[in-house]
Amino acid sequence: MTAQPFLSFALPELGDDEIAEVVDTLKSGWITTGPKAKRFEQAFAEFLGDPQIECIAVNSATAGLHLALEAIGLGPGDEVITTTHTFTATAEVVRYLGADVKLVDVDPATLNIAIDAIEAAITPRTKAILPVHYAGLAVDMLAVLDIARRHGLRVIEDAAHALPTTLEKELIGTLGSDATVFSFYANKTMTTGEGGMLVTRNPELAKRARVMRLHGMSRDAFDRFTAKVPSWYYEIVAPGFKYNLTDIAAALGLHQLKRLPAFQTRREQIAMRYHEAFADLPILLPPDAPEGDVHSWHLYVIRLADEAGITRDAFIEGMFAAGIGCSVHYVPLHLHPYWRDRYGLTPEQFPQSQKFFERTVSLPLYTAMNDADVERVIAAVRGLLA
Ligand SMILES: *Cc1c(COP(=O)(O)O)cnc(C)c1O
């Protein structure tokens, strides 16, 4: 028997339509932000299904989060409450602006930010709450928005995992926070290679983010070359950033977005197959969305039970030995030297996140996997645990 090729933890699924659109862009002569970035923003707004929502394409979700926080006026002396169980990008953007991060623990049932902990972390300096829809399961935004309303706080959602995710049948991005940011990084539920989308119903926030997206120019490159005012004229109103999405990337996004519902169906199918195949094993399965709601299944994260008889590290090594890539999402922020030292954090302050981290493994789950790949993952997991 020949050894099977290594099964990557994550791979994008890019087809002929994406490739043809990129080639068309390259041949068009307009390779930076232009007509396709604009079309991608319009298509994204249509996908969200609300004409009140403005979509601002950016070159990463990190950039989008930075722009959203800048636009609400976050600055030194302010605090932002977020989950310790996230990628560092969620929190680093707060530091870009000189504000401070208040990390809180997760709810073990959802692995999302613990709602009680948010309220307990509020101080007179708190300016915003930054929830993360972990793995693609919606945070209880009704509770978050209620806390924000009662305390006069802003809410920016890190929806890097949450496309398409719903809460009470409404898509994340349409729920009434100040802004929501999606990621199109290579391993996310749709990709532009690198890219992101800032969405908001607040016209002032949108205006500021558009200006700051491109050097603080009073209009972006597309408008500059098509509007009636002289094409060479622009004004700088602030020291902005270079966060625009290229048309090459938007070309990918236009087709990935069309495929998103089919992608979600396939991801859910794989997740349900894993659920069924692992039901008798000593692991805790990832939480499902409530009945009637959509989980994006960006990640399939299992927790090894006490009686599993194998450590997290040995489990991942065993999977690698079987030719299967796994990962850990995440090493919580409170364990990273920068965050730990800046805020004097200890694992005891985050018991749920800490316990979860010590037992968690993310299994491969992506649309480019075929059924044989899925069964291979199942066989390897059962081989280590059954
Ligand atoms: C991927 C990710 C980001 C950053 O997305 P980029 O598009 O790579 O900047 C932010 N937050 C979370 C939770 C992520 O998983």
Image (cartoon, helix red, strand yellow):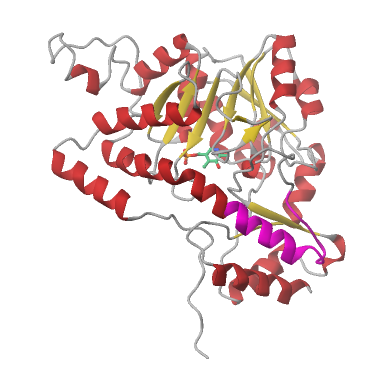
Q: What residue is shown at x 72% (from left), y 66% (from top)?
A: 277
Vertical placement of 64 versus 106: above or below? Answer: above
Whether 119 is among the magenta residues is no
Vertical placement of 276 versus 169: above or below? Answer: below
Whether 274 is among the magenta residues is yes
Q: What residue is shown at x 12% (from left), y 10% (from top)?
A: 230
Q: Quadrant of residue 107?
A: top right
Quadrant (top left, top right, bottom left, bottom right) of the C terminus: bottom right
Q: Residue 272, can we see it?
A: yes
Given residues 219 and 103, the one toward you in this image is: 219
Instruction: Answer left or right for 206 relative to 334.
Output: left
Q: Residue furthest bottom?
A: 1
Given residues 307 and 350, the one toward you in this image is: 307
Q: Which residues are magenta?
A: 267-286
Residue 186: x, y in percent? 44, 49
Q: What residue is shown at x 32% (from left), y 16% (from top)?
A: 216
Q: What residue is shown at x 72% (from left), y 59% (from top)?
A: 275
Q: Quadrant of residue 373?
A: bottom right
Given residues 364 and 129, the one toward you in this image is: 364
Residue 361: x, y in percent? 68, 58
Q: Magenta stretch: dominant SS?
A: helix
